[in-house]
Amino acid sequence: MSRGVQRAGAGQGVAAVVQLLVTLSFLPRVVEAQVTGVLDDCLCDIDSIDNFNTFKIFPKIKKLQERDYFRYYKVNLKRPCPFWAEDGHCSIKDCHVEPCPESKIPVGIKAGSSNKYLKVANSTKELEDCEQASKLGAINSTLSNQSKEAFIDWARYDDSQDHFCELDDERSPSAQYVDLLLNPERYTGYKGSSAWRVWNSIYEENCFKPRSVYRPLNPLAPSRGEDNGESFYTWLEGLCLEKRVFYKLISGLHASINLHLCANYLLKETWGKPSWGPNLKEFKRRFDPVETKGEGPRRLKNLYFLYLIELRALSKVAPYFERSIVDLYTGNVEEDADTKTLLLNIFQDTKSFPMHFDEKSMFAGDKKGAKSLKEEFRLHFKNISRIMDCVGCDKCRLWGKLQTQGLGTALKILFSEKEIQKLPENSPSKGFQLTRQEIVALLNAFGRLSTSIRELQNFKVLLQHSR
């Protein structure tokens, strides 16, 4: 072989190697490159949210979630699925929700109903019988023996209306307290047709979508060949703002949950000791633009949109908590004061964010049409909250119900601005009220979104290091 041919062959080989390296170095950045810029339907950019969340919100919301008031959530995981026959519960051990000894629940949280946090209510000396106290042991919490005589009635003033969620009956013997810190949201192995059926029902029947238009990459929909879902998005963009927002909220919630599962994945188990951590392969399967035919970055943008909506709700509800009458009561006076100070500090940060979503752009048409659309919006979301009782994995059901209730509470806040502005300083409001469960769900749901965005930054770093 002549030297010229050898050089040409070598040159081609080098060129091929260079091209391969360029390709490999580019692929990890695809997600990062496409999840940037200004979000649709608002004027906020993703970089601003990243910086705001990382340096202001995330450290504080994480600390707040560790406080007793926010770590215990009462939930009924035994409600039957109202839409189809049960497939049977997940038998994987990681689906299980750890039992919560009654003796671990703080004194001020252990009463029968919903929202003992007003000082007016806290002044009472009467204690509930707590008939179900002995039955509190089917979920996770770690409280104290003083709790035994505590559980004073939280919900003297639950006059709230316009619920966006199907609320659990907290007096039901099946409703139990869960310690959220001991039951972290993570990958449990729950997947397949049962899990897909839940999400399929949510998207196909509750997102204002005609049945003839299929979601991209929906395994339960008929095959569409090489269609990457562009026809779906053509249809979606033709919707009114309110219905478009609804879809983005659900998609953003789905993306956030998937991020939690990718970031807290069972990597290995040695001698019964599990090791949890980020799974880059799983992240790419769910979000990489190549593996998802361009769908992944859309999902992540909807996560940011949902974050923006819940951030706006927190800024709007701040006056409700700024009143001296509101006391986040657990029975520990010193800790309760510190918890409220931290919460108000977070509210101040949310109000300082310069590019909030403008909820006034929604339901702004003629009064009759706007009222009808708002009610349709509310009922669709309420239906989704009921679908959460069809989730076969207890741990997934727990976090699905909590995050759905948190978003429903955020929507309730956004559409109650006038009522919040009229709140009396020293007495309960008949026009707007939040139960303790709504408060706990609201802050923990936003904490999950804040964590999702933080984990997304971590995955970007892992992608860069994997080149």
Image: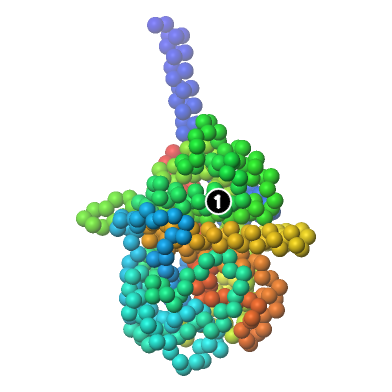
87 vs 128, nearest the viewer: 87
Name the residue: 75% across, 62% down: 368
| Left or right, residue 340 beside residue 88 | right
The residue beneath circle 1 is 205
Location of residue 467 (image quadrant) = top left
Number of numbered discs visible in the structure rendering: 1
* Residue under the point 61% across and 51% down: 208
Q: Quadrant of residue 134?
A: bottom left
Asked whether residue 335 is in view, the answer is no
- Foreground: 355 or 197? 197
Identified by mark 1, the residue type is Glu
The secondary element bearing badge 1 is classed as helix
**Residue 429 in picture, x, y percent from top left:** 63, 81
Answer above or below: position of 139 versus 376.
below
Left or right of 100? Residue 165 is: right
In the picture as drawn, the residue positioned furthest to the right comes out as 366
Q: Residue furthest left?
A: 271
Determine crowd level at label 1: few under 14, some 14-19, many 20+ residues with C-alpha closer than 10 A. Answer: some
From what the image shows, is residue 264 above or below residue 315? above
| Residue 152, above or below 84 | below
Measured along the vertical axis of the image, is residue 266 above or below residue 337?
above
312 with respect to 268 (left or right): right
Front residue of 434/369: it is 369
